[in-house]
Image: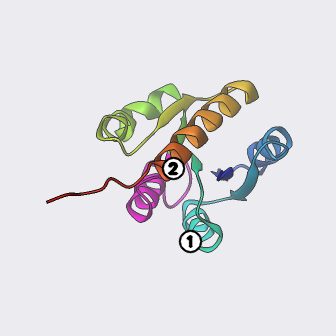
Amino acid sequence: MNRKVLCVDDEESILKGMHLHLSREFDLTTATSGEEGLKAFSDAGPFAVVVGDMRMPGMDGTEMLKLIKDLDSKVKTILLTGHADFEVGGADLLQSGQLYRILTKPCSPAKLKSAIDSGILGYNAVEEEPEEDVHY
């Protein structure tokens, strides 16, 4: 079962908190920018879940998560955002299936763990689906 999680946030203190609360349960990789997140996704993947912050300098979270979904349609993507940020593209990505979940900041470690666990189960369920036999 793939339990690899990539967390991307430009605030080191947020990443340290994520590492503290998540690294015992998940195979955790962190990155400090959208560009670094894409590189980590390509270099260290496949990941079951990618968590990205909405507001980052350069490439924002929605752009990074969309590019990641383009690379691997099975990955479950979670956007961390403030209420006002959600209006800027988050709803459209959620409806289009590009985002698995949107969590608002501040987000408790328990809520984040639960969303990641759910994403991992969803990712691995897709991985384990048997191939259908096609008969003509």
Where disc 2 sits, the SS reads helix
Do we see residue 61 in this rendering? no
Instruction: Judge from the rendering whether residue 97 lies leftward or rightward of residue 119; answer left or right.
Output: left
Residue nearest the viewer, comparing 54 with 39 = 39
The image position of residue 51, as x and y in percent, is 59, 46
The residue positioned 56% from the left and 52% from the top of the image is 56
* Position of 117 relative to 74 (above/below): above
Where disc 1 sits, the SS reads helix
The residue positioned 58% from the left and 39% from the top of the image is 121
Residue 128 is marked as 2
The type of residue carrying mark 2 is: Glu
The image position of residue 44, as x and y in percent, is 65, 69
The image position of residue 21, as x and y in percent, is 82, 38
Within the magenta stretch, is there residue 42?
Answer: no
Give the magenta-colored segment's residue range: 53-76
The residue positioned 30% from the left and 56% from the top of the image is 133
Pointer 1: what residue?
42
The image position of residue 94, as x and y in percent, is 37, 36
Q: Label 2 neighbourhood size at 10 Å, few (<14), some (14-19), many (20+)?
A: few
Q: Are marks 1 and 2 in contact (CB under 8 Å)?
A: no
The type of residue carrying mark 1 is: Ser
